[in-house]
């Protein structure tokens, strides 16, 4: 290949490495991608693609492959990586260059995959990532010896530092690609036991020659683990951490929420002053601002929740939590490996469902998929926050805790307990099947990077704002139209919405939901809420804005529903949202991951039945106790 062709033809470079080696951070650094970085196994469940131009003008297409411990795949995400680097993935050409990313602080684990990949015969380079951390821990790596023994170029990278990919970029700039006819590729075969043993012995031999490490390099992590992984203290620390997370969601968000709420109300008042009464004013104030604006106000609470989740991910604490919960989850037929997909579902059930690909056994994976929607995702947060603020007084309990935060924590705990109960039922259904033993790498503790935290929060904020500005706004405009037309007949005495298409639909559905305390306005809000849970808040804002009259039109939604609903109805609706499958996107993800509509129907059916039954019981008990 000529020098001119080398510069014009894009080079396909695949990042291959173990989970936790900083591969995705390096991918972000190289390509400027906003792909999320997390310090636990299984966050990257599909290969990601980005592009860069080197200083010399060469275009490089970079693939971020799912983390894998070996090419002998044991899970779905490892199979994706194996198929790409061995040329067995349909429609995916072989990479021109394998960039093996290894955690410089843990080469004993990482070099096994490097040796397996080297046997494929593809052009390769080894990137010693986290090399700065290795030096801080007193680990000395002789790169010349390591390169000689591996027969590969060895570079240093630091994925979380601005100039951390300097050596790799220079190498990509001058690397000469071999022609397809000149590039040897050895077909991959699953290794035999003797070959695995030989690879391990070779790793130890190379480490003895090239690496010197302090014997006490992990003493600090071990001391922390002595407390964090303690059967009693560890569980108390985990419970306290989650508890304080939900306290902060209410305590820290008050000021920014009030600012957003004031801005939306001021904008609505400005529209009323400058636009004459009519369809356009109603569309903007009752449709757009009352709907989409009523959802946007909950952005601070969502970002606070994600801040805690990102800190726990980046610090290396999550795998410890998985080990702590392994025994508890084993009682319902799951392993601690299910914990990470379930925790991901607190952000959104869709990546949680996708993250189940890291679970080796299909039955464990299927049960985890089926209970993932019971984890309280961030889309429920606007609904919870609205109802809790309207019906639960802002009161301090025991001089420390916020009562509203306690109720929020109880809702999250209810979802978790419901998920464990459903998993136990599945365990009985499956018969005597023991839980899968949990084998997982514990990454070193790290101080979360400010850059990664900011990128993660910006990404979440943009996703939420785009949803508000696209699907939620579109649904609110559609709902406003259905709630406005046709107009009331001559001599009508009720609010106009009562005679509209939406009002007629709500009144038709009311007989279904009346036994659990829902009125026709709630029934209307549940329908568009199927597309996305947080839409229900905007839908209620639109419905009540069009249902009210006089000065009530400008009133906040919280006081309106507090005046219109009973406490029993509010509690019933809260419980409904703990269990109901109010998200079509999640059901679509389940269809894609299971390749079966049968499991989608099973999930939707049992979740709706569970939600209706739990709401009915809640409404009856609350009414009996005086909440009606």
Image (tube, rainbow, N blue to C red):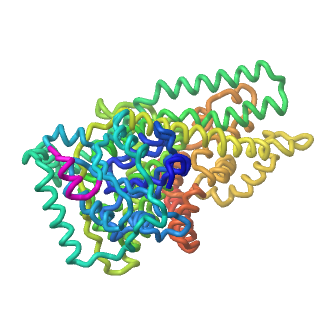
Residue 231 as seen in the image, left or right of residue 304: left
Give 196 or 351, whichever is nearer the viewer: 196
* Residue 176 is a magenta residue: no
Residue drawn at point x = 41 percent, y = 49 percent: 175
Give 22 or 493, whichever is nearer the viewer: 22
* Total marks placed: 0
Give 617 or 480, whichever is nearer the viewer: 480
* Residue 148 is a magenta residue: yes
In percent of width and height, residue 628 lies at 55, 46
Q: Mostly what secondary structure, the magenta segment?
A: helix
In percent of width and height, residue 118 lies at 31, 63
For residue 164, which quarter of the picture?
Answer: top left
Residue located farthest toward the right when viewing the structure as drawn? 490
Residue drawn at point x = 70 percent, y = 39 percent: 542
**On screen, 247 above or below 120?**
above
Residue drawn at point x = 78 percent, y = 39 percent: 495
The residues colored magenta run 140-152
For residue 478, which quarter of the picture?
Answer: top right
Q: From where the camera sits, is residue 395 visible?
A: yes
**On screen, 231 above or below 486?**
below
Q: From where the camera sits, is residue 380 visible?
A: no
């Amino acid at each position: 290949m000529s020098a001119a062709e080398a510069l014009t033809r894009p080079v396909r470079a695949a990042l291959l490495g173990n989970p936790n080696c900083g591969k995705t951070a390096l991918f972000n650094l190289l390509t400027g991608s906003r792909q999320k970085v997390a310090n636990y196994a299984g966050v990257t469940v599909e290969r990601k693609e980005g592009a860069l131009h080197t200083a010399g003008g060469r275009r490089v297409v970079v693939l971020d492959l799912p983390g894998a411990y070996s090419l002998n795949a044991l899970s779905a995400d490892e199979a994706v990586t194996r198929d790409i680097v061995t040329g067995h993935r349909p429609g995916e050409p072989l990479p021109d260059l394998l960039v093996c990313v290894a955690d410089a602080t843990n080469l004993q684990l990482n070099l096994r995959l490097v040796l397996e990949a080297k046997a494929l015969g593809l052009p390769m380079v080894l990137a010693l990532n986290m090399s700065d951390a290795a030096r801080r821990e007193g680990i000395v790596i002789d790169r010349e010896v390591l390169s000689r023994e591996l027969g590969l170029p060895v570079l240093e990278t630091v994925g979380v530092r601005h100039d951390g990919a300097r050596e790799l970029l220079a190498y990509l700039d001058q690397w000469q690609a071999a022609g397809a006819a000149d590039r040897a590729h050895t077909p991959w075969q699953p290794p035999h036991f003797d070959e695995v043993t030989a690879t391990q012995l070779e790793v130890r031999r190379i480490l003895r020659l090239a690496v010197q490490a302090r014997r006490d390099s992990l003493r600090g992590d071990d001391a922390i683990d002595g407390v964090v992984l303690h059967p009693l203290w560890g569980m108390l620390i985990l419970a306290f951490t989650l508890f304080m997370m939900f306290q902060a969601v209410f305590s820290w968000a008050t000021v920014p929420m009030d600012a957003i709420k004031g801005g939306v109300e001021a904008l609505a008042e400005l529209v009323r002053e400058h636009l004459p009464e009519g369809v356009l004013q109603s569309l903007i104030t009752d449709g757009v601002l009352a709907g989409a604006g009523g959802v946007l106000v909950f952005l601070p609470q969502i970002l606070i929740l994600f801040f805690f989740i990102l800190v726990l991910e980046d610090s290396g604490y999550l795998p410890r939590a998985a080990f702590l919960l392994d025994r508890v989850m084993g009682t319902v037929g799951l392993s601690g490996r299910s914990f990470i997909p379930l925790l991901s579902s607190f952000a959104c059930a869709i990546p949680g469902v996708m993250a189940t690909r890291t679970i080796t056994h299909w039955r464990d994976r299927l049960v985890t998929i089926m209970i993932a929607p019971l984890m309280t995702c961030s889309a429920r947060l606007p609904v919870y926050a609205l109802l809790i603020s309207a019906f639960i007084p802002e009161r301090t309990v025991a001089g420390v805790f916020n009562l509203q935060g306690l109720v929020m924590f109880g809702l999250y705990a209810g979802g978790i307990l419901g998920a464990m109960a459903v998993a136990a039922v599945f365990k009985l259904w499956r018969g005597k099947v023991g839980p899968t033993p949990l084998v997982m790498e514990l990454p070193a503790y790290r101080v979360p990077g400010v850059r990664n935290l900011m990128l993660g929060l910006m990404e979440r904020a943009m996703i939420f704002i785009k949803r508000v500005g696209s699907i939620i706004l579109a649904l609110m405009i559609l709902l406003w139209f259905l709630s406005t037309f046709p107009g009331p007949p001559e001599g009508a005495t009720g609010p106009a919405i009562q005679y509209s298409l939406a009002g007629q639909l709500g009144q038709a559905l009311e007989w279904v939901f009346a036994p659990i305390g829902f009125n026709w306005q709630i029934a209307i809000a549940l329908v568009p809420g199927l597309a996305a849970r947080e839409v229900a808040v905007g839908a209620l804002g639109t419905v009540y804005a069009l249902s009210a009259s006089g000065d009530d039109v400008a009133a906040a939604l919280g006081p309106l529903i507090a005046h219109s609903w009973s406490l029993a109805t509010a509690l019933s609706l809260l419980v409904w949202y703990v269990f109901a499958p109010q998200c079509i996107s999640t059901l679509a993800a389940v269809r894609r991951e299971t390749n079966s509509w049968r499991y989608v129907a099973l999930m939707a059916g049992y979740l709706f039945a569970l939600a209706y039954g739990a709401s009915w019981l809640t409404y009856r008990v609350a009414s009996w106790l005086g909440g009606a």
